[in-house]
Image (cartoon, rainbow, N blue to C red):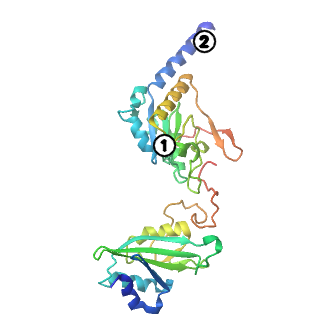
Amino acid sequence: MTPLQTIQQHFEARLIETHDFRGDETVVIAGGLLTEMALFLKKTPELDFNYLMDLTAVDYLFFAGGRIEKRARFEVVYHFFSLKHNHRLRLKVPVEEQNPEIDSLTGLWASANWFEREVWDMFGIRFKGHPDLKRILMYEEFQGHALRKDYPFNKRQPLIGL
Amino acid sequence: MGINHFFTSKMSDALGWARKYSIFQYPFVTACCGMEYMSTAAAHYDVDRFGAGFPRFSPRQSDVLFVVGTISQKMAPVLKMVYDQMCEPKWVVAFGVCTCTGGFYDNYSTVMGIDTIIPVDIYIPGCPPRPENVLDGLMKLQEKIQKGEQSRTLYDPKTKKGRPAQLGNTP
Ligand code: SF4
């Protein structure tokens, strides 16, 4: 059984969407299910995702010139890897624009710490339960979130000089 | 009057000559241009032939600040502090397009040319500049040092003109 099939068997209709493109397996779930899903991924012996490889976000504002409707403005994307079984999984969680907040995974994977700070810094998505959620790349004086699509690309916020 | 004038001009010539062949440089290396800086400094191109072979990693002991690589907005106050700590007379070389103009990093994080922060004497464009380019820049800098010239202007992106730099507050 592939990881995707194991997950489908366990969660059934609670998954929003799944797809499998040439062995690249993806699961889309709602934010409320994240903690349960993360525990399942880490603790199930035949999945055993002990390595969170990447955590990032996508801003779908103006996506495809507005022709494609997305569920929510943001999507947080996780990439998991199992060193034991040598398999991977991509997990996507839509996040609303009004209250961009989602559970933190720092308790399960320590590598989530800095990734989540980066997503907060660049997209302004808050992580509930993160031990120290502050900017990681930009300076504290920086206003706004630089990788949001509505951040003006030519806006400058110098610390000194012009 | 004649004899005094003769002595002062000869004296500054001698000073310029001594300074241009004993450049103690401070390499402020932040990005990929550093590779080309190392190649210029190492035996094959050998900046030591120009008397600039001795990098000092203390700004207080150096004459020329080599700014090598992209300067981000977060790094800018550090660069300014290093510049302020250098003793007069001092010169600045902008190494690579990132330091000259910001290069292709037209975005939220990068300083659009270090001459908005500190006065620059020599611009060496290129991404990265070839070592020959760097040596050419170094020779032009030596000419400048010989003449006793130093840049004292900053670039103002709003008016697109130079403006005098406010110097002299060494922390
Ligand atoms: S000018 Fe090019 S090589 Fe030099 S630091 Fe910038 S990007 Fe790198």
A14 on left or right of B42: right
The disc numbered 1 marks a residue on which chain? B
Q: Amino acid at mark 1?
A: Pro
B15 on left or right of A162: left
Q: Amino acid at mark 2?
A: His
| Residue positioned most to the left | A84
Neighbourhood count class around disc 1 (C-alpha, 10 Å): few under 14, some 14–19, many 20 upward: many
Q: Find out if the beta carbon at label 1 lies less than 8 Å from the nearest ligand 1 atom.
A: yes
> To which residue does mark 2 refer?
B5
- Residue B165 makes an appearance in the image: no
Number of dots carrying numbers: 2
Residue B128's tag is 1
Secondary structure of the residue carrying tag 2 is helix
Q: Residue at x 64, y 75 (%)?
A: A67
Q: Nearer the viewer, mark 2 or mark 1?
A: 1
Task: Report the Cα–Cα distance between label 2 and label 1.
Answer: 44 Å
Q: Position of residue A122 (x, y in %)?
A: 54, 66
A115 on left or right of A161: left
The disc numbered 2 marks a residue on which chain? B
- Residue B104 makes an appearance in the image: yes
Circles 2 and 1 on the same subunit = yes
**Circle 2/circle 1 CB separation < 8 Å:** no
